Amino acid sequence: MTPVLLVELNRGQLHDIEAPAEFATSEPFSVELRNHGEAVHVHVRADESLSAAARIETDGNLFVERETTQSVPVGVGPVDGPVTGTLEVATGYGSETRSVQVTIEPDPGGNAVDVDETLANPQRPDPEPETPSLAERLAGVLPGRRVVPVLVLGVVAIAVAAAVANAVRSPAVLVGAGIVVGAVLVAIVALFR
């Protein structure tokens, strides 16, 4: 995880800067500019001593929007011994400045690589997803328990309407039976939506 030098902006008043007095690291880090108020121009620069071991990866003149956090990456080169210099953060076109004494230390592990203990466990391929059983597939296709009584009632209503229309053979009864059949079909379509 990249070390972070946190700088708070506009927490008390406009152009206010809060930063630690000193910061030490042996690896690249980022200066997090956390703005608590109005948008502000911020200038971040390293003095000559610090520039020998660290470089600001972006343009040091930044515009930090209201209520946002902006990250300024700082690269660190290899050093034989500790290098100390000053990182200056300025707002209000230089009217407010804060200096942080930054020490770049030699990498204690040289070219060592941190190994997480999870690498000791062998990688297992992801198990293949189980295929659903025939019963599960049929359950997805067949209507649910609440639908079956409605379907049975609809079939009975259509059968009764057809039997009455056939027995009476009157145009009015035939129209009524057609309305019943149409209503049942509409109900079934709405049930399956």
Image: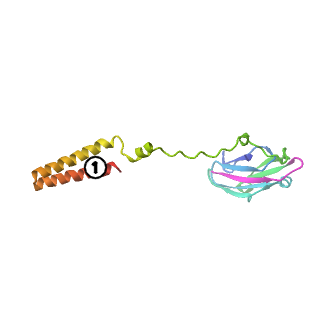
**Foreground: 175 or 68?**
175
**Foreground: 148 or 193?**
148
Residue 70, horizontal then vertical, whole percent: 67, 52
Residue 165, horizontal then vertical, whole percent: 14, 51
Q: Which residue is mark 1?
A: 187
**Foreground: 104 or 171?**
171
- Relative side of 17 to 52, left or right: left
Q: Can residue 160 be spotted in the picture?
A: yes
**Residue depicted at x 83% and y 48%:** 111
Magenta-drawn stretch contains 34: no
Part of the protein shown in magenta = 68-83
Magenta-drawn stretch contains 69: yes
**Residue depicted at x 13% and y 52%:** 166
Q: Which color scheme is applied? A: rainbow
Residue type at numbered disc 1: Ala
- Relative side of 150 to 90, left or right: left
